[in-house]
């Protein structure tokens, strides 16, 4: 083993520190810089000279100050206490810092990532003499009423349980078991360490055929994402990226939510921190924070910590995936993460490429999204990480590098439109510029609920595409010159926009829509389209269809009919059928 020795700061360029005499250090090794012991990471090595990116404000650090290597990479502490906690990019608990009375994070501050003085109710699940290997679940802790924290054997450990504690209350530093391996005896505690930049291992990656149900109609029906899938939400300022991610975090059917605020404004993260503890989980009625971990790295925090916060979030997500949970990771926003990469790259004097971004931007994006997916874990369970990353292209220009490179590595693209947002149409996801490559993967799941789901979805999309072409004619000559068959397209498109695509996040009934309600509303719209087209083709004026009382009922159904009220939805369908039948009888 190489002998490590303290180094000396020779040059400082913002968050980039140059040092010498650091013989024996390794790439991505954590070091402490200066008298305040600021946390840094080695990013370049040339003989005994190193380049370090510092994760804290280096103001006041001078050449000649000490650089102390720690001997290991930047790692997270993973164990009971993650759920409900709020961290910065370095996994310092903001909850614990707040409890000490501090309004800001002092430079060089060291706090516990997990509660050190709290005991947890441990329940052993294996006995002495059992053979265990990487990922084997040896016990459990009921971390919150919603989440059972499964204590796993760390990766690369395999052997026989020599002893294990009985059921009881223990803190995280308690040695709960010893494993006899070929290399010796290994102590097992309720937590484990893992480097943030290294993906956690799994057995095999699988193809996902189940959707991540979000309760948002335009997503679930028009542009679904599979569990373990990756999606991007690009949009200009004010189009609702953060609000859309909030809605997904609140209502999607993942068991664990990891929300990463990467470079967001402080008031937006404050809204998250204030709102989330008040939110109720729709399935259990309990606080949403009982299955959520937040990573907050606002725009006024050091830029290097912003760069690592994404890896902090995905590592925590992988840890819960390894337990067999479905995890949803919200990254808001990857553009500000890319901007951090650009700034650090400039400080490192690397050659810039498109718009000043580093040449390794595509590989960094690929490495991040690659860590999502549906996998068979080392313990044989099935777990998934679904990644939803927002992108903030300047001026809403989707041709900029971050958006274009992101599209290479995701299969679901929810493009937010400024015109829709200005018209107060939310979610402002545009139905013509968005796409999902998961439709074929999840269509069987939807067909089990309604065999005609895919046909209805495609019909609705066709109506919206035909309406877009007609709007170009309408702008030139007006709608009055169109025949009733084309006016029907405009009418149905308006109904789809109002009754289906728009969704009010502040309406108690409309904020979440079940798959059953989605398919039933869509079924009503498609019947109105098909049967209405028939009566118009037989000579009935379009006003007969437009003036049906059930049309207004259909437009209001999202607000007036609860998601679990199947009888009311069926009754609406029957009323539409009855009123159409009367018109048909009049024009036979």
Image (spheres, rainbow, N blue to C red):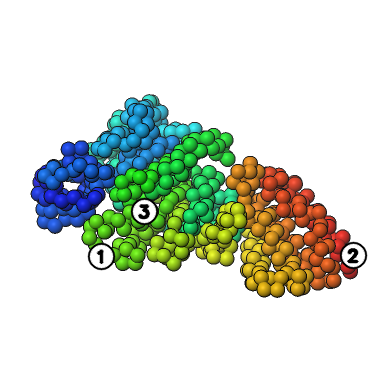
Report the residue marked by disc 3: 337
Number of residues whose C-alpha sits closer than 10 Å to that of mark 2, classed few (under 14), some (14–19) or many (20 or more) = few
Query: 501 left or right of 56?
Result: right
| Residue 243 visible to the viewer | yes
Q: Is residue 544 above or below residue 558?
A: below
Report the residue marked by disc 2: 586
Q: Position of residue 164 (x, y in %)?
A: 32, 32
| Residue at 26% in and 38% down | 107
In the image, which disc is placed on residue 351? Answer: 1
Q: Is residue 284 above or below residue 203?
A: above
Query: 306 left or right of 4?
Result: right
- In the image, 53 versus 195, the foreground residue is 53
Q: Position of residue 343 (x, y in %)?
A: 30, 56
Number of residues whose C-alpha sits closer than 10 Å to that of mark 3, classed few (under 14), some (14–19) or many (20 or more) = many
Give the Cα distance between marks 3 and 1. 19 Å
Earlier residue among tags 2 and 3: 3
Earlier residue among tags 1 and 2: 1
């Amino acid at each position: 083993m190489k002998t490590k020795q303290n180094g000396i700061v020779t040059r400082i360029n913002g968050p980039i520190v140059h040092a010498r005499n650091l013989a024996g250090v390794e790439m991505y090794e954590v070091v402490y810089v200066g008298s305040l012991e600021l946390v840094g990471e080695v990013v370049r090595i040339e003989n005994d000279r190193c380049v370090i990116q510092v994760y804290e404000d280096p103001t006041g650090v001078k050449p000649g100050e000490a650089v102390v290597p720690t001997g290991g990479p930047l790692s997270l502490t993973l164990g009971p206490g993650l759920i409900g906690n709020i961290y910065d990019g370095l996994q310092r608990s903001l909850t614990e810092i707040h409890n000490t009375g501090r309004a800001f994070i002092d430079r060089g501050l060291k706090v516990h990532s997990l509660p050190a003085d709290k005991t947890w109710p441990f329940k052993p699940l294996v006995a002495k003499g059992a053979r265990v290997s990487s990922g084997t679940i040896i016990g459990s802790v009921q971390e919150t009423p919603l989440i059972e924290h499964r204590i796993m054997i760390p990766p690369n450990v395999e052997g026989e349980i020599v002893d294990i504690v009985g059921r009881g209350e223990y803190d995280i530093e308690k040695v709960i078991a010893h494993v006899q391996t070929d290399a010796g005896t290994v102590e097992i505690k309720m937590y484990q360490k893992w480097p943030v930049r290294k993906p956690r291992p799994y057995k095999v990656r699988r193809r996902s055929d189940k959707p991540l149900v979000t309760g948002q109609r335009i997503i679930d029906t028009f542009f679904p994402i599979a569990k373990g899938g990756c999606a991007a939400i690009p949009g200009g300022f004010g189009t609702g990226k953060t609000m859309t991610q909030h809605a997904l975090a609140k209502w999607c059917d993942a068991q664990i939510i990891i929300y990463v605020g990467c470079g967001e404004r402080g008031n937006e993260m404050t809204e998250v921190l204030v709102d989330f503890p008040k939110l109720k989980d729709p399935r259990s009625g309990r606080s949403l924070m009982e299955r959520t971990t937040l990573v907050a790295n606002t725009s006024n925090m050091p830029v290097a910590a912003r760069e690592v916060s994404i890896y902090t979030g995905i590592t925590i997500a992988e840890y819960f995936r390894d337990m067999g949970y479905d995890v949803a990771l919200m990254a808001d926003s990857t553009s500000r993460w890319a901007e951090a990469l650009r700034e650090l790259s400039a400080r490192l004097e690397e050659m810039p490429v498109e718009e000043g971004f580093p040449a390794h931007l595509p590989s960094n994006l690929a490495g991040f999204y690659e860590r999502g997916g549906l996998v068979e874990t080392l313990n044989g369970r099935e777990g998934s990480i679904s990644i939803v990353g927002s992108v903030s292209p300047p001026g809403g220009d989707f041709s900029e590098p971050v958006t274009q490179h992101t599209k290479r590595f995701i299969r679901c693209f929810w493009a937010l439109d400024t015109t829709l947002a200005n018209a107060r149409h939310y979610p402002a996801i545009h139905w013509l510029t968005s796409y999902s490559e998961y439709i074929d993967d999840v269509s069987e799941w939807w067909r089990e609920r309604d065999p005609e789901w895919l046909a209805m979805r495609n019909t609705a999309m066709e109506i919206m595409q035909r309406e877009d072409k007609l709007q170009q004619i309408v702008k030139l000559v007006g709608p009055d010159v169109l025949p009733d068959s084309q006016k029907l397209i405009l009418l149905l498109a308006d109904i789809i926009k109002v009754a289906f695509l728009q969704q009010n996040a502040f309406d108690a009934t409309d904020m979440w829509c079940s798959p059953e309600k989605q398919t039933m509303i869509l079924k009503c719209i498609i019947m109105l389209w098909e049967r209405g087209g028939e009566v118009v083709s037989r000579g009935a004026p379009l006003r007969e269809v437009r003036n049906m009382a059930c049309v207004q009922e259909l437009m209001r159904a999202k607000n007036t009919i609860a998601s679990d009220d199947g009888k009311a939805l069926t009754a609406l369908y029957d009323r539409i059928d009855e009123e159409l039948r009367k018109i048909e009888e009049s024009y036979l």
